[in-house]
Amino acid sequence: MTSAHNGSTENGAVSDKITVDNALDNVDVTQFAIHDMRAHARAIAQGNTVVVFDTTLRDGEQSPGATLNTQEKLDIAQQLARLGVDIMEAGFPAASPGDLEAVKMIANSIGRRVRLDRDGKVAAPPIVAGLARANKNDIDKAWEAVQGAVRPRIHTFLATSDIHMEHKLRMSRDDVLETVGDMVQYASSLCQDVEFSPEDAGRSDPDFLVQVLEIAIKAGATTLNIPDTVGYTTPEEYGGLIKHLRDNVPGGKDVIFSLHCHNDLGLATANTLAGVKAGARQIEVTINGIGERAGNTSLEETVMALYTRKPVFSLETNIVTTEIHRTSDMVSRYTGIVIQPNKAIVGANAFAHEAGIHQDGMLKHKRTYEIMDASAIGLNQSTLVLGKHSGRNALRAKLEGMGYHLNAEELKDVFKRFKDLADKKKTVTDADIEALVGDEIYQPVETWELIKLQVQCGNNVIPTAVVTLHNNKTGEEITEAGFGTGPVDAVYKGINRIIQVENTLVEFLVQAVTEGIDANGDVTIRLEVPDSRGYSQTAQGRPRRRLFSGRGVDTDIITASAKAYMQALNKMLSTVDNESSSVNIAADTAVLAPAVS
Ligand code: KIV
Ligand code: ZN
């Protein structure tokens, strides 16, 4: 199955089904290679454009349950390119051969394709970055993964806070200074675009940071990223730290200072904006703010703050803001991380006005209660409502108006589901259509497919389900029955009897897509693999609980629940299969942790 927007195929190659993208294929992409990295960095450092470094596919993917397969990563990367991100951190190549392969595919496809900017002009492909700990093995792997991009970047990091150096790295300050110099120089010998991050900078001694960063610049880094790794700082502190570093690091005014904030105290966006005010010109962000623990700074919040409060910041970004809503929806569907309704910018209620007094004000003058237009983030404003008499062309026009350019096969599938829905519901809203498209298009490779489902439940009966599944690899079709404490439990037991892969259901959420008794039900679930195969580590060496999410939409919530379960199981099967050959990261971490000399 291919994505609505990107034209990428199952094996990761990027196909040519979108006319506008085809036209761009004839543009010579090599003209966008950066020849003088120092001059490029200086121009950004001293200009008025804040470059957006998206780390949804790396820090975002470290969120529990956000496991993405290669196809999903490619789809998201393509959508991030459309969104206009300047740099995408495509992953942590040393984590496993699968991670390396995914980054390589992104570098060789999206990293080599021109795109259109928000004025419709041809623009450079995004810089594709790979994360590496400060050791040769990681740096080699990162370079192997990103070198196919027209604009490759190696992002290497080493912790600089006393607590990390003493307890995690067991390195002295001198050891750290030496390693930073050696490893940044090594990365620079491979790739002219090198970013260095002193991990836990937010809790590091600012004067030690000045020393570290001076060495990193001398060794070839042109972007210095200042992570508030544990989300500890306040906006005044973080902005003050950026100013201190820009003022005191020799050569600091000629390199790009970058901001990377975690949201443990809910201050990530505020801290990032304070850093921008203090002169940083790169922001490291994720879609929907996903990421380790409480997440990272959210792209949509920061970009829309810069956009909506232009007189306060007097800065631009290259983001195509009308792609924000769609990107947010895609990331939420693929990761299974549901967006809280009151989330700024992309939450379901962000543009809803419930209170009578607000509605009255809105009718008199939109700006009484709305500081930005929903259309600015690509939320559809059209009043064209579809119903059961609407034909395929009306649906296609509607979808195109919403930004979905489906191929004939995808349109056929979505139209069939639209007709089924329109038979049950009087009017089919934009939200229903978004849900249908997402449910149809954003699917993992299916090993097992749900063919038939029959459920008996009610008062004084034992909930019973009969399930038929088809195995797309072997061609076999199997029917089994399950009994449970309720209808969903019965269905899941029936499915388990067929697929026979151990898993624990750790989360189950049902939501209505729209209001009313005939609403589509939208079910999101998470599964955990109960043995070590399901566990891995983050770039920082923390154990990562590996959860697999699934989402299903249907007017029948039992069917939606079955679809969600099948999606999560299919993801789990393909990921665990791919991982059997992954490297042992725990052993690898030893490179970073020599005994104190
Ligand atoms: O939060 C952090 O410190 C990081 C670094 C690897 C940049 O994600
Ligand atoms: Zn981080």
Image (spheres, helix red, strand yellow):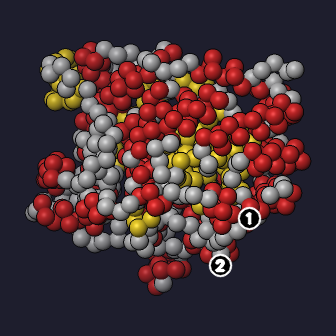
The three-letter amino acid code for the residue at tag 1 is Gly
Residue placed furthest toward the right: 207
| Residue pointed to by mark 1 | 279
The three-letter amino acid code for the residue at tag 2 is Pro
Q: Is mark 2 within 8 Å of ligand 2?
A: no
SS for callout 1? loop
* Residue 279 appears in view: yes
Q: Earlier in the sequence, mark 2 or mark 1?
A: 1
From the top left corner, tell me how far across and down residue 466 is, in percent.
Answer: 18, 22
Q: Which mark is residue 311?
A: 2
Query: Which-is-in-front pick, marks 2 and 1?
Result: 1
From the top left corner, tell me how far across and down residue 577 is, in percent.
Answer: 37, 20
**In which quarter of the view is residue 246 placed?**
bottom right
27 to the left or right of 188: left
x 52%, y 66%: residue: 318
114 to the left or right of 434: right
x 69%, y 20%: residue: 590
The crowding category of the residue bearing disc 1, from other C-alpha atoms within 10 Å (few below 14, some 14 to 19, many at least 20), is many
From the top left corner, tell me how far across and down residue 431 is, in percent.
Answer: 32, 57
Above-or-below relation of 395 to 375: above
x 44%, y 29%: residue: 98
* Residue 356 appears in view: no
Q: Are marks 2 and 1 in contact (CB under 8 Å)?
A: no
Q: Quadrant of the C terminus?
A: top right
